[in-house]
Image: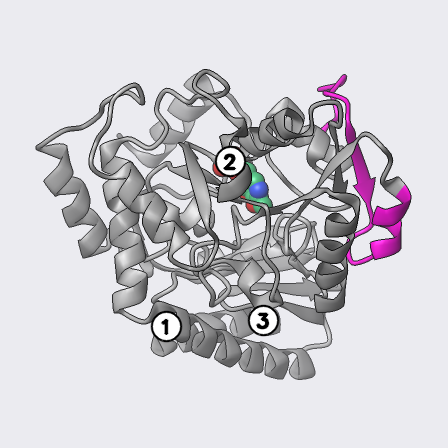
Amino acid sequence: MKKEEIFNFYNKYILGTYFKLPVIFVKGKGSYLWDIDGKKYLDFFPGWGVVSLGHCHPKVMSAIRNQVSKLIFVSNNYYHSFQAKLAKELNFFGFDSKVFFCNSGAEANEAAIKFCRKFGKTRYKIITFKNSFHGRTLACLAATGQEKYREGFLPLPEGFKTAIFNDLKSVEELIDKETIAVMLELIQGEGGVNVAKEEFVLGLRKLCDEKDLLLVIDEVQTGIGRTGKMFCYQHYNIQPDIITLAKGIAGGLPLAAMMVREDIADVMKPGSHASTFGGGPIVCSAALAVLKTIQKDKLLTHVIRMGDYIFKKLAELKSKYSIIKEVRGKGLMWGIELNIPATKIVESALERGLLINCTQDYVLRIMPALNISKKDIDKGLKILENVLKYG
Ligand SMILES: Cc1ncc(COP(=O)(O)O)c(C=O)c1O
């Protein structure tokens, strides 16, 4: 099929829920993708952070290949060898939890919301934050602190209140006798790469303890090494009560998880919640390969080093180009706020062979693979500089 035919085919048969760039990818390896015309692209935003170890990582491929020939799927009414093993590996980083596996970030957050309500008995209200993003299901939209996603989908489930990010007093003011939890992204990805301040997060933990509230950390975007720790909360010296994970956990396959503090986890009983596809043998095998590779290849240290390097380089660009207003982020999750709309920059970068993203209209976003090399970072930032310079 020719390119135009594929575009037309999509337009005819696929529901138009996505903004799409006119490029058709056919092959990927590491931090590179190739399109249908054979053009090569450097990927600074692999699968929205899903392809955490780069495209077609050999360990992920071999885990999938090995498993696919033995057992593709069994339902959650039976046991298989990998789910509990994966849960144990996730616990290794210091959060003693029981884990529920599902398929997407929204589904993990739905599970967390349902857990909070079950735990809370008569308390059901959850405080979330302005500019947060927690997913597209109705409850997750109600949790998401951005009006634009809700338009046309009202009424939403009740019981969600929106506080101001990094403003502890605004949280305090919203707590009443029906409040059960606070739900937070430590770096708001879709909200513009806004980083939570340390004193705010420490204060929030203390407040939750004083008011007997659960602290739910949405690590769908920040988790699995993205910020240089396995979980972003580890930068803040706190313990959450619930963590949700998705994106990078299985190196490109659909897997998500809700981790709940072990001592409260038994609120959920057989029949309380379920997900038919959640945590099958193939996705869990892929996730085990991802976690093993992160540790074996010392990728957390690499992410911190590359993150420091990217920040230094972006700060240099900021001092050279007045269109850059601010650079924010941690590890390999960076936002570059411009004082001009960023969409054109994304399109020009694509033409020059670099894939980046834009959020909140003015913020360029980069989240390269956790194992990206310094050489590829230099290459990508050079392309970005040329786009900023020449358009
Ligand atoms: C922080 C956060 N939570 C939840 C979600 C929803 O994840 P999914 O699209 O897998 O449902 C996203 C997606 O971007 C996210 O960034």
Which residue is at a point 51% across and 26% down the rendered structure image? Answer: 268
User: Where's residue 330, x and y in %?
Assistant: 57, 68
Figure check: 326 above or below 146: below
Which residue is at a point 31% across and 55% down the rendered structure image? Answer: 291
Q: Amino acid at mark 2?
A: Ala
Say whether residue 106 is visible: yes
User: Where's residue 23, x and y in %?
Assistant: 40, 44
Which residue is at a point 20% across and 36% down the rendered structure image? Answer: 81
Badge 2: residue crowd in 10 Å (few <14, some 14–19, many ≥20)? some
Quarter of the image where ligand 1 sits: top right
User: Where's residue 379, x and y in %?
Assistant: 40, 74
Identify the coloring. Answer: one colour
Asked if residue 57 lies left or right of residue 368, the reply is left
In this figure, which residue is indicated by the disc labeled 3?
A: 390
In this figure, which residue is indicated by the disc labeled 1?
A: 376
CA gap between label 3 and label 1 equals 21 Å
Figure check: 4 above or below 358: above
Look at discs 2 and 1 and give the one toward the viewer. 2
Badge 1: residue crowd in 10 Å (few <14, some 14–19, many ≥20)? some
Q: Nearer the viewer, residue 358 or 69?
A: 69
Which numbered disc covers residue 12? none
The answer to which of marks 2 and 1 sits earlier in the sequence is 2
CA gap between label 2 and label 3 equals 55 Å
Quadrant assignment, res 74: top left
